[in-house]
Amino acid sequence: MKKFSYRKACLVLLCVIIFLIVISAAYTYFYYKKDHTSNLLAHYSPMQSSEISLISSDSVSFVYSVTLKSRKLSELHCYLRIPAHRRSSPVMILLGGLNTGREVINLVGETELTQDFVFMSMDYPYEGKKKGISALEFIKQIPAIREAAFNTVGAVLMMVDYLETLPEVNKDQIFTTGVSFGAYFVVVSGALDPRVRAVASLYGGGDISMLVAENFPWGPRFLRNAVGFFAELLILPVEPLRYVHRISPRFLLMVNGSNDEKIPQESVQKLFEKAKQPKELVWFQTKHIQPTRSVLTQELTEIVNKWFQEKNLVMHKESRDSIY
């Protein structure tokens, strides 16, 4: 009798395990198939108020510290750079690395092209530890990382809200450029917001699972692949591959390094193939760019600006009276 009960218990346990596996597989399948646009837009609410203060000024530009507030984001800290001529100018929203944040605006040099642009950058809406993080700390911060990823998309849309209120801004000439970490978010936010006229993704790619597995610093390959799979499940709503086709019929520029040790070429090609025309992919024989390097950031910004000019995306018109 005991032997029979033991076998019966094992059979019941096996059935429960199989049932859970089937349910998990079904949930994962439908989760992958689901359109997560509404999930992302739920993390966005229009800007309600702003605070601005002058940091510096010279004969070329004025630089401001800006804090934006909305129902979803209590505070979003940004930098804003406005050309001294103050006529209605095209805008580049510039997203850099996680650690660089809004300081990326200070890495953009003063050139003939950049002097005609308004620039805006932001600190990512994430308050957790960013450097020297252990595996255990990373696991603990997963919920906060997930929430910050979703909020970042909403934050970019809120920046567009703010820029549209400025007399120095040509509302028909709003562009987004993302470097490295920021490249993923300009693709998603640019796809969701038709106010963005063109998107430039610099040293980014698609396929979160592949990218996480390639860059996860601990363990053997099978462990990194497993981490990549679960990471994709957690932040699937911000997978660039799911949105990049929506940028069309607006322009997409991708710039990548053929020797990039962080972004596999397969990841780049996947994103480019998912995108629709008009699109362009430019390869450089470089490794991954770190957005803290001012010379490279200046060079890439210049490349993007020239591309905007070549595509006849940039024009100027007289400004309304400045609000500052």
Image: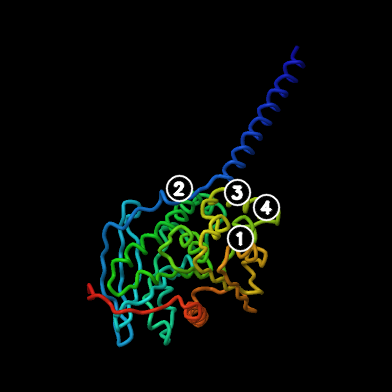
Q: What's under tag 3, amino acid-wise?
A: Phe
Q: Position of residue 178 (x, y in %)?
A: 49, 69
Horizontally, residue 38 falls left or right of residue 50, namely: right
Q: Label 3, on which residue?
A: 230
Q: Which circle, 2 or 4, is nearer the viewer?
A: 2
Q: Which is nearer the N-term, disc 3 or disc 2?
A: 2
Give the CA distance from mark 1 to mark 4.
Answer: 28 Å
Q: What's under tag 4, amino acid-wise?
A: Leu
Q: Label 1, on which residue?
A: 274
Crowding at dot 1, Cα within 10 Å, few <14 / some 14-19 / many 20+, comes out as some
Residues at circles 4 and 3 in contact by the CB criterion of under 8 Å? no
Judge whether 30 appears above or below 279 on screen: above
Crowding at dot 2, Cα within 10 Å, few <14 / some 14-19 / many 20+, comes out as few
Judged from the image, the secondary structure of the residue bearing numbered disc 2 is helix
Crowding at dot 3, Cα within 10 Å, few <14 / some 14-19 / many 20+, comes out as some
Q: What's under tag 2, amino acid-wise?
A: Ser
Q: Position of residue 203 (x, y in %)?
A: 57, 70
Q: Label 4, on which residue?
A: 223
Which numbered dot is residue 38? 2
